Amino acid sequence: EAQVTQNPRYLITVTGKKLTVTCSQNMNHEYMSWYRQDPGLGLRQIYYSMNVEVTDKGDVPEGYKVSRKEKRNFPLILESPSPNQTSLYFCASSLSGTYNEQFFGPGTRLTVL
Amino acid sequence: ILNVEQSPQSLHVQEGDSTNFTCSFPSSNFYALHWYRWETAKSPEALFVMTLNGDEKKKGRISATLNTKEGYSYLYIKGSQPEDSATYLCAFIDSGGYQKVTFGIGTKLQVIP
């Protein structure tokens, strides 16, 4: 089944404790992206990647890192999480950029205490 | 950060009514516009990808039009059904943004049986 998977789905952590949210797709998509969703602010793009080893900042990259060492994986790293990073996070992928529809993962609900 | 606006923010209609909502975006540097449907507790799902001025797309009872010169897109739902209840998101990609995606906040539609 073609899909985008994220892990974990739910995470409660404390300020400053490094964490990684994994994202993987099995559709051989080139474009992958991370979004956060906050009430009243909608989906905001954190980082995106056009292909392996090619990443770029979205609108809200501060406090996050990403890497794209393999085509299928695009992990999101929070090196020192803070409470303002409490949010619902979505990973998405598309075949070859934004002329194609994005397929979204199930979301990761992160709470930073 | 680009300004992508959706109106109205929420909408209640009776089953069988037809409805439409608007996505407004910067009229310069257009690259692509996406529409997504987002049901509660699920992930956004793509409806349409629109890339050319004058584009019209249709999927069942849902259709969309695009005017890049004036910077807007309309989404129409004909004969609304309760299962159409969801938040409808538009996402704008500008040609100078290297495939960066900016979402609107969405229009929340509730169809009353």
Image: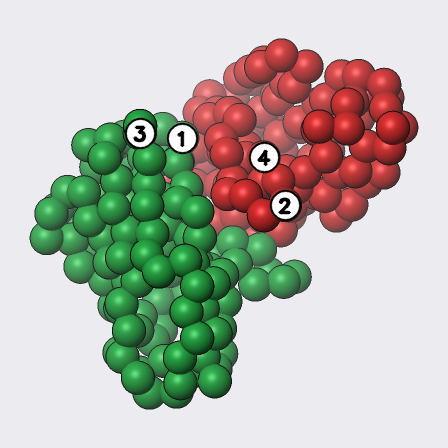
Chain colours: A green, B red
Q: Which mark is residue A2?
A: 3
SS for callout 2: loop
- At 50% from the left and 43% from the top, the residue drawn is B43
Q: Which mark is residue A101?
A: 1
- Discs 4, 3 touching: Cβ within 8 Å: no
Disc sitting over residue B40 in the figure:
2
Q: Is residue A113 visible?
A: yes
Q: Which numbered dot is residue A79?
A: none
Is label 4 or label 1 in front? 4
Q: Residues within 10 Å of mark 2 (few under 14, many from 20)?
A: few
**Is there one chain holding both mark 2 and mark 4?**
yes
Q: Amino acid at mark 2?
A: Thr
Question: Real-space Cα distance between discs 1 and 2?
Answer: 20 Å
Q: CA distance from mark 2 to mark 4?
A: 10 Å
As drawn, A13 above or below A42: below
Near-viewer residue (B23 or B67): B23
**x 46%, y 21%: residue:** B52
Residue at left offset 71%, top offset 23%: B76
Q: Of label 3 and label 1, which has the lower sequence position?
A: 3
